[in-house]
Image (spheres, rainbow, N blue to C red):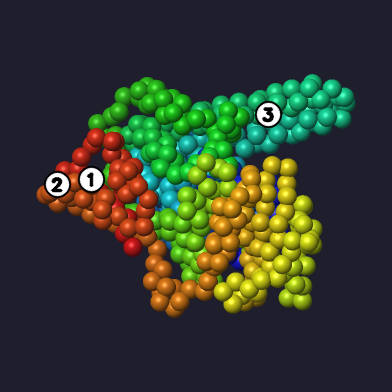
Amino acid sequence: MTGRCLVAAPALICAALTLSACGNVGRFEQPGPTAAVAAPAKPNRVVQQTPATEREHERILSTYGGAYDDPKLEALISKTVERLVAASDRPDQAYKVTILNSGAVNAFALPTGQLYVTRGLIALASDTSELSSVLSHEMAHVLAKHAAMREDQARQAAVVTRVVTDMSTDPDLTALALAKTKLTMASFSRQQEFEADGIGVGIAARAHFDPYGAARFLTAMERNAALKVGRTALDPRAQDFTSSHPATPERIANAQTTARQYTAPDNSERDRETYLAAIDNIVYGEDPSEGFVRGRRFLHPKLGFTFTAPENFTLDNTAQAVIGVREGGSQAMRFDVVRVPAEQSLGDYLNSGWMEGVEKSSTEDININGFPAASATAHGDTWQFKVYALRFGSDVYRFIFAAKQKTTESERNARETVGSFRRLTLEEIQAARPLRIKVINVQPGDTVESLSHRMAGVDHPIERFRVLNGLDAHAQVKPRDRVKIVVD
């Protein structure tokens, strides 16, 4: 939690600010150590680094909790990339893969050939062919020069927007022109995603990986996203028609259609055993050292505090803040850290202008479990806010609660959540271990239900077990099957 968010416009209360990419995102992390990367496919191919790409690389690391160091995974990815490169139309193109220390399910690429894949995505995949479909998809973005095309399209859209808004006095005409520009940009991005899917499936098939790996993994992604409880229009991952990525069902259908064009050779591989051996013991979900969510509770062992969100709230640990949304979307909360000079009082900070609509007369100095704090209310066009600033050691933490209507319940939720903020005990800090993927053999008598009961720290354990192991709603396990479970 070393990164401090200094901008807190009310509109940001319900949005996790995340890096746009090809998957689901969301974490609240600290910058990590020096990147641990899989080696380039061949020593004589080197990814060209520029100051701009180095800055982007560091930004990605800081957003996604740094690099995840796992030699087994790095070796598997390096070998997989080497096969894919050899099967591509550009075997001279260099790639370098960084595993990101994030439980988010995500992967993306820079134009230079730097590929990024989160350990959350790696944990979700069930075999090497599924991982190869992700890597080949991101390689396709590089080969098709999609990043450069997007930049050019964005520049054109910016010109159109500026001309329309500067020249037009008709608000309806202006809105229509801007809407058309947005739809053009979205359509272009959707086409890029479908194109990358098609190219990627072809590369994976020519590398003798199962061409249906892409469809299976996209299905897993869709099912994994569906397990996210309490999703509303406030959820930053709720996509509308103008989203930059096509709906996953469309991508699944297209990936299946593309895969049928390739007659799977006899040596078409899923390589499940090798893959499961490589991911055994991988950290699952959030890294406790950077703060993590357990149900409605957020804990940060490194910084030594915890708090509990109200009932019916779903917490998300994002790169910039902990975001909470009440089921139904009528209430939300944000928790983050800000820089406040030691000589500035917390009441003065709340009234310093960082947030519009603050009622200065409502500002009150209070004490929360022995920590100096201050509170205030604020009003927006459609939201009512209750804001708290709390000094914990040398840091100041901020709770921002938003409600569409101020009610006794919303007031109580804010008060009780802030009141739950406390210092972790030494025992709690020592007990805060990461969840991990454990690969086990199914024994006679084991069922999906009995194995899911061995899962620790996850919501919807039965559904989660099925998704992690690529099992549909009616599939059963058999003795000697190798399956993934989550343990602490």
Q: Are marks 2 and 3 in contact (CB under 8 Å)?
A: no
15 to 355, vertically: above or below: above
Q: Quadrant of the N terminus?
A: bottom right
Give the quadrant of residue 354: bottom right
Regarding residue 100, the answer to whether it shows in the image is no
Q: Label 2 belongs to which residue? A: 479
> Which element type, helix, strand or loop, lies under badge 3?
helix
Reading the chain from its start, which is encountered first: label 1 or label 2?
Answer: 1
Q: Label 1 belongs to which residue? A: 448
- Distance, label 2 to label 3, CA atoms, is 53 Å
- Distance, label 1 to label 2, CA atoms, is 12 Å
Position in image of residue 201 (x %, y %): 42, 31
Regarding residue 262, the answer to whether it shows in the image is yes
In-front residue for pair 381/479: 381
Reading the chain from its start, which is encountered first: label 1 or label 3?
Answer: 3
Identified by mark 3, the residue type is Lys
In-front residue for pair 92/123: 123
77 to 260, vertically: above or below: below
Q: Label 3 belongs to which residue? A: 182
- Distance, label 1 to label 3, CA atoms, is 45 Å
Residue under the point 40% across and 63% down:
434
Residue under the point 52% across and 41% down:
328
In-front residue for pair 197/111: 197
> Which element type, helix, strand or loop, lies under badge 1?
helix
Q: Are marks 1 and 3 in contact (CB under 8 Å)?
A: no
Q: Quadrant of the C terminus?
A: bottom left
